[in-house]
Image (cartoon, grey):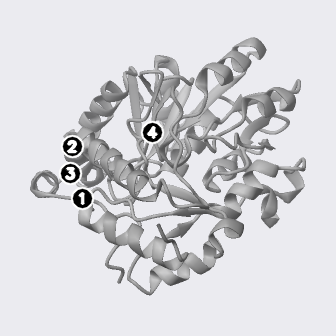
Amino acid sequence: MYKYPVVEPEIGEEELRNVVEAVKSGWVSSKGKFVEEFENSFAKYVAVKYGVATSNGTAALHLALAALGIGPHDEVIVPDLTFAATVNAVLYVGAKPIIVDIDPNYWCLDPSGVREAITSRTKAIIPVHLYGHPCDMDAIMEIAERHGIYIIEDAAEAHGAEYRGRRVGSFGHIACFSFYGNKIITTGEGGMCLTNDEELAEKMKTLRDHGMDPKRRYWHNVVGFNYRMTNLQAALGVAQLSKIEKFIEKKRRIARLYAEELSSTEGVTLHPEMSWAKCVYWLYSVLIDEEKTGITRDKLAEKLQNYGIDTRNFFYPLHEMPPYQKYANLPYPASSAISRRGLSLPSSAKLSEEDIIYITGKIKEAIGYTL
């Protein structure tokens, strides 16, 4: 067990009361009051009309693509640096992922690369708000609108993040969130699709429930999925959502402390926050320059582990992994360099100032930092 895990949920009495209420009600599966309450409350929080809760974030991505009718012969643009669920969902519907490099300044999908990747077959773009930092949504939306392309926001890691004062998840035709145990708010497992389109919302609800006609039980007009969220999960989510602003402020405070302690450490690039963004720092992450620090990212992680400090390497670029290599259009200089250097530090909302000072002290010690 790590003394300082990369992230852990913060669960209290409110969550316990809701879950107990759900259990006592007898509605422990996909029916029950908490599911609809969570859908409506989360949609309202993001300033979107409709929420469709799902069993997990990957299911949300798959559901979004299916509801938009994306399939074989279609192309979907995805960033090279993302969790594999983003590209896997594209493959689930038989579409072709078009892998695009990231912007090196803030680690998200590069709009200039998106422009170059557009073809007559491009049906959708999936911007991923990586590690809690928003994408440049004005640029991406302008491209999509010019070409008549769908936007599916992957906001799994960015609950509450803002682009020019507007919460992520409110830009695309559909936005997808994850509530896995390590996310800013959690339902254990779970996800959600958000949309302002009532017809899309109803379509996703039908597809989520095996494709069953909502007005004619056990009659199926389409092939659907079992992607429903349980009432138990939603009960946890309702309580978590009531605390989200406190969680985000804690995350941002932790980020400020990391920045203060590491800002003078040569060879350590801090987690970015662009002037137009409010980053929620799902995982506070840094880049390690081996030439300047005298230590590799992996060796630093190993040393920190000896002190009970958990870290996580950045995602591997999609183009490097066997299932996705055939979709690569090399080179990918930004994602390749950043992936090799990136390290996520303990980021739980529970961390104290003393914890951050200890962790950053061990980082400085490991790289031989001196004033």
Mark 4 or 2: in front is: 4
Where is 346 relative to 46, above or below? below
Q: Left or right: 228 with respect to 37?
A: right
Q: Amino acid at mark 3?
A: Trp
Q: Which residue is mark 3?
A: 27
Residue 278 in sight: yes
- How far across and down, in percent of the image, does residue 366 sit? 51, 78
Classify mark 1: residues with Cα within 10 Å, few (<14), some (14-19) or many (20+): some
Q: Which residue is mark 2?
A: 243
User: If the image is split into quadrants, where does the N terminus sit?
Assistant: bottom left
Q: Which residue is mark 1?
A: 10
Badge 4 is on which residue?
Answer: 279
The percent position of residue 210, horizontal first and vertical second, equals 50, 44
Farthest residue to the front: give it: 371
Q: State how far apart marks 1 and 3 are (Cα).
A: 25 Å
Horizontal arrangement in the rendering, residue 158 relative to residue 356 (left or right): right
Mark 2 element type: loop
Q: Residue at x 55, y 75 (%)?
A: 367
Lower sequence index among marks 1 and 2: 1
Label 3 to label 2, Cα distance in Å?
A: 24 Å
Mark 3 or mark 2, whichever is nearer to me: 2
Q: Which mark is first along the chain, 2 or 4?
A: 2
Mark-to-mark CA distance, 3 and 4: 37 Å
**Is disc 3 in contact with disc 2, using a CB cutoff of under 8 Å?**
no
User: Residue 32, can we see it?
Assistant: no
